[in-house]
Image (tube, rainbow, N blue to C red):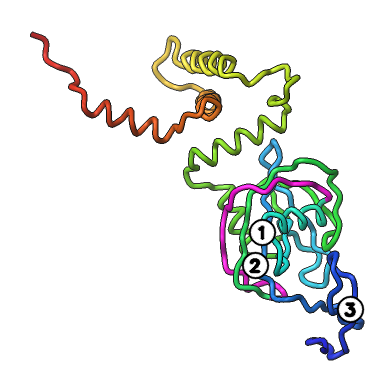
């Protein structure tokens, strides 16, 4: 078999942990048709996203999410965890699918790309593989990106549509785990009792913003207080096996059957 670019005879060389047909002249690699490409969206506690700078021959110097091709015999999340480790030095738990797009702007092109949320579970941040630098960036301060669909996915993160309860629950658990508060020796045990107390205290703080006034003075502080209440509510519900969506709908149905504001006799 010969190289598609410079027509040199291909040789078996170790690439990406496997022997693959590789051009000794230009370095082009013949990959067995990949079922899909995968990319990881990893955010830190500040909401910054992890990007890697490409070091290969294709769009070198531009940045992208940690990504790569699946092997033809590889499970999707295992393959993405492998790519994240290769390119960033981090061990990752791969979570929900964020987006699916056609991926024809890659080399070689492939029909399907899947973007998944991931959380760091170990390792040390160190670029490797096809990347020469790995770094977290604020979503409004991104470097030049290599791929259009990465830009689209990151734009959706920066200006998200209303998140589902399931998504908020997962993000909340990821944050709590990152702080070690689910550990047995945590100084902040995440028990239902403690969560209920915290929820009540945060709800009381909401009242402070309206004490002796009729309007909200500081919108940012107001949003933060409401977010604290919601976070504890979501955590308490999930910890006690309550499906909030089903519970709210059941309560609405029950309230709808009640007679409200009956005239006094």
Residue sticking out furthest to the left = 265
Q: Position of residue 42 (x, y in %)?
A: 69, 47
Depth check: give the residue in front, 39 or 139.
39
* Within-10-Å neighbours for mark 1: few <14, some 14–19, many 20+: some
- Which SS class for mark 3? strand
Q: Which numbered disc, 2 or 1, marks the residue closer to the eye?
A: 1
The residue labelled by disc 2 is 36
* Within-10-Å neighbours for mark 2: few <14, some 14–19, many 20+: some
Q: Is residue 8 left or right of residue 240?
A: right
Q: Position of residue 261 (x, y in %)?
A: 18, 18
Disc on the earlier residue, 3 or 1? 3
Disc 3/disc 1 C-alpha distance (Å): 26 Å
Depth check: give the residue in front, 79 or 129.
79
Query: What secondary structure predominates along the stretch shown in magenta?
Result: strand
Extent of the magenta region: 89-108
**Placement of 180 over or under 202, stated as above or below:** below
- Which SS class for mark 1? helix
Q: Tell me whether circle 2 and circle 1 mark residues in contact (CB < 8 Å).
A: yes
Disc 2/disc 1 C-alpha distance (Å): 8 Å
The residue labelled by disc 1 is 76
The residue labelled by disc 3 is 12
Q: Quadrant of residue 76?
A: bottom right
State whether residue 219 appears in this view: no
- Which residue is at a point 49% across and 38% down the rendered structure image? 165
């Amino acid at each position: 078999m010969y190289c598609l670019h410079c027509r040199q005879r291909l040789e078996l060389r170790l690439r990406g942990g496997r022997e693959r047909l590789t051009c000794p002249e230009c370095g082009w690699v013949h990959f067995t048709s990949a079922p899909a490409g995968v990319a990881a969206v990893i955010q830190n506690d500040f909401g910054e996203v992890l990007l890697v700078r490409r070091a290969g021959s294709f769009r070198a110097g531009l940045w992208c999410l940690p990504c790569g091709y699946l092997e033809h015999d590889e499970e999707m999340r295992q393959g993405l965890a492998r790519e994240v480790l290769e390119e960033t030095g981090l061990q990752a738990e791969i979570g929900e699918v964020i987006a699916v797009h056609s991926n024809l702007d890659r080399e070689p092109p492939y029909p399907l790309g899947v973007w998944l949320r991931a959380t760091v579970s170990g390792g040390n941040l160190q670029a490797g593989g096809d990347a020469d630098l790995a770094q977290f960036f604020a979503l409004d301060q991104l470097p030049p990106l290599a791929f259009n669909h990465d830009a689209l996915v990151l734009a959706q993160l920066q200006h998200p549509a209303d998140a589902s309860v399931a998504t908020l629950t997962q993000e909340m658990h990821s944050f709590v785990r990152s702080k070690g508060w689910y550990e047995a020796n945590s100084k902040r045990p995440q028990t239902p009792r403690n969560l209920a107390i915290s929820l009540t205290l945060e709800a009381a703080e909401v009242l402070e913003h309206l004490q002796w006034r009729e309007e909200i003075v500081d919108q940012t502080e107001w949003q933060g207080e409401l977010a604290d209440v919601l976070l504890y509510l979501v955590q308490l519900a999930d910890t006690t096996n309550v499906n909030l969506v089903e519970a709210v709908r059941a309560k609405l149905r029950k309230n709808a059957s009640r007679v409200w504001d009956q005239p006094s006799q």
